[in-house]
């Protein structure tokens, strides 16, 4: 995996220089419920303020990698990604002053991405494992937003 160039994207001041990459690595390496929950939490903090329910434009820079993990990751990595997208696309909002990036709405761009991966999410709803529940929840969010 080649390193992402995220320097042009505004991100939380609290992020270390490698904070976003470390959060993505945690998502990739999630291997059970505990590590998936930790990865989800770390990722939301790297994107913004998990407690305030906000995110920064840096989310736009990681979307290709999020899609890659969703398609190629192990089931726990996929679950952590989908749980993150449920929050980011459902209840989170852009941080104040960061609603737009390069003339586009960050929220609308994020939502368009989430809607565009619907077919990948739909394929993960089979079965009764935790990943299938997360996929069903994300699918419900997508369908509600598209209605």
Image (spheres, rainbow, N blue to C red):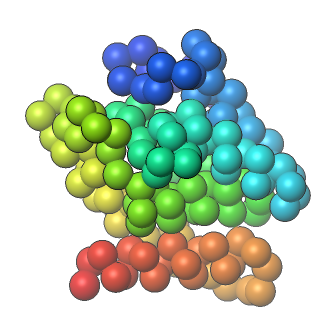
Q: Which image quarter: residue 91? A: bottom left
* Residue 113 drawn above or below residue 120: above
- Seen as rendered, the residue at the extreme left is 103
Quadrant holding the C terminus: bottom left
Quadrant holding the N terminus: top right
Q: Is residue 12 visible?
A: yes
* Residue 66 drawn above or below residue 60: below
* Residue 108 drawn above or below residue 127: above
Whole-percent x and y of residue 103?
12, 34
Which one is in front, 10 or 4? Answer: 10
- Seen as rendered, the residue at the extreme front is 52
Side of 45 where 147 appears, left or right? left
Which one is in front, 95 or 34? Answer: 95
What's the residue at 41%, 31% (across, down)? 58
Whole-percent x and y of residue 113?
35, 55
Which one is in front, 119 or 43? Answer: 43
* Residue 80 drawn above or below residue 128: above
Side of 104 where 96 appears, left or right? right
Whole-percent x and y of residue 82?
58, 62
What's the residue at 36%, 24% (across, down)? 10
What's the residue at 51%, 65% (across, down)? 86
Q: Which image quarter: residue 60? A: top left
Whole-percent x and y of residue 94?
32, 44
Q: Is residue 68 visible?
A: no
């Amino acid at each position: 995996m080649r390193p992402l160039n995220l320097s042009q994207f505004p991100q939380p001041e609290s992020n270390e220089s490698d904070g976003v990459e470390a959060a993505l690595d945690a998502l990739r390496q999630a291997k059970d419920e505990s590590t998936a929950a930790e990865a989800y939490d770390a990722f939301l903090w790297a994107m913004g303020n998990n407690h305030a329910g906000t995110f920064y434009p840096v989310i736009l820079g990681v979307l290709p990698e999020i899609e890659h993990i969703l398609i190629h990751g192990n089931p726990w990595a996929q679950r952590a990604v989908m749980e993150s997208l449920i929050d980011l696309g459902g209840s989170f909002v852009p941080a104040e002053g960061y609603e737009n990036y390069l003339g586009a709405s960050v929220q609308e761009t994020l939502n368009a991405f989430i809607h565009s991966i619907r077919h990948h999410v739909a394929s993960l709803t089979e079965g009764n494992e935790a990943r299938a529940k997360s996929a069903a929840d994300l699918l419900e969010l997508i369908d509600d937003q598209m209605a």
